[in-house]
Amino acid sequence: MNTDKPGPDRPERLKWHPAFLQALQLELIEYKNSLQFKYEYQLTAEPLRVDLLIIKKPPGLTIDKNIARIFRSDNILEFKSPEDYLSVKDFLKVYAYACLYAAITPETELSGVTLTLVEQRHPRDLISYLTGERNYRVEETGPGIYTVNGDYLPIQIIETKRLPAGENLWLKLLTNDLESGAARDILEGRKEAAREAPLSAYLDVLMRANPEAFMEAWNMANGKRTFEEVFTEAGIIPQWIERGIEQGETKVARNLLAKGWAVEEVAETTELPIEKVRSLAVD
C-alpha cells in the first residue's frame, strides 16, 4: 500500500518552489533581459540540484534591488517553504554545492559565486551557528535581509515575512497565512504582473494554501462567487479542483462558519450540500 498518496489524513504537499521561482522573476523583472534563471539546476550526473541558479549577464551589471545587491555572476539560492526552516545542515549543503558548482562549471570562479538562503521565519538557529561556531558577523542590512560577513563567499539570509511589501510584494506574500487584504493585493496586481513574467504556479500555490483569504478578497470586490469561480476568474484552474475540490470547500466552510456566517450563506458560497454545512456547524 502506498502511504505517500494524498488523502484526508495526508493532504497533498504544496509545490512552493515553482512559486518561489516566479516570485523571484517578478521581484527582478527590471533585469529580466540580463538574468538567466535555472530552476533546480543539476550539478552532476547524479541528482544533486540547487533550488535556483541565477546567472547575471553581463557579470558586471549592478542590480539596484535589496534582495540582489550581493549578486555576482553566478548566484545560488536555497528556498524553504512556509512549513520548513533553514537548518545548519542546509547551510553546509548549499555551501558545498557552491564549491562544487565552481569546480565543475567551465569559466566559473568561486569568487563569482554568491549564496542566498530564503525562508519565512526568523533564522535564529542558523544565525546563532554562524556567529557562534563560525565567528561570522551577521548584520541586518535591510528589513528581513541579513548579510553574513567573514566568509570568502558573499552570503545573505532573507526572512521573507519582514521584507517591505512596497519593494518585495511577491516574496513577502509567498506564505500560507495570507489575510484577505494581501490576497486582494495579489488579485489586483496579477494581470499586469502576468504580462511581464509567468504567474500561474505562484497563484496556484497561494490559492491552494490560502483559499478562504482569496474567497473573502474576491467576494468583497465582486460579490458572492463560488469556490471554483474565484479560481477560474483569477486566470487559473488548478488540477486539484478536479481531483477533490470538496476538501478545500470544507476547509473554507469551517472558516466561514467560525466567522459567524449563516449556514445557508456558507452552502451557497461553497456549493456544499446544506446538510453537509449543518454537520460542520455542529462539529
Image (cartoon, rainbow, N blue to C red):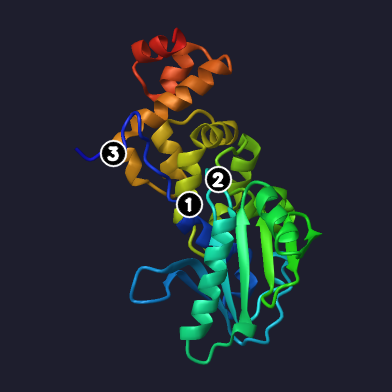
Residue 230 appears left or right of 92 = left
User: In the figure, 216 relative to 73: above or below?
Assistant: above
Q: Nearer the viewer, residue 217 or 89?
A: 89
Residue that carries the numbered disc 3 in the rendered image: 243
Q: Residue furthest front?
A: 133
Instruction: Kindly state the secondary structure of the residue where label 1 is placed.
Output: helix
Q: Residue furthest top?
A: 282
Q: Quadrant of residue 175?
A: top right
Q: Is residue 27 above or below residue 182?
A: below
Q: Residue 179, percent across and down?
A: 62, 36
Instruction: Give percent across and percent down for residue 163.
Output: 71, 53
Q: Are marks 2 and 3 in contact (CB under 8 Å)?
A: no
Q: How many angstroms separate mark 1 from mark 2 (CA)?
A: 8 Å
For label 1, the residue is: 16
Q: Mark 1–mark 2 contact, CB under 8 Å?
A: yes
Instruction: Identify the mark at residue 82; answer none if there is no mark.
Output: 2
Q: Quadrant of the C terminus?
A: top left
Question: Percent position (x, y) of residue 25?
Answer: 56, 66
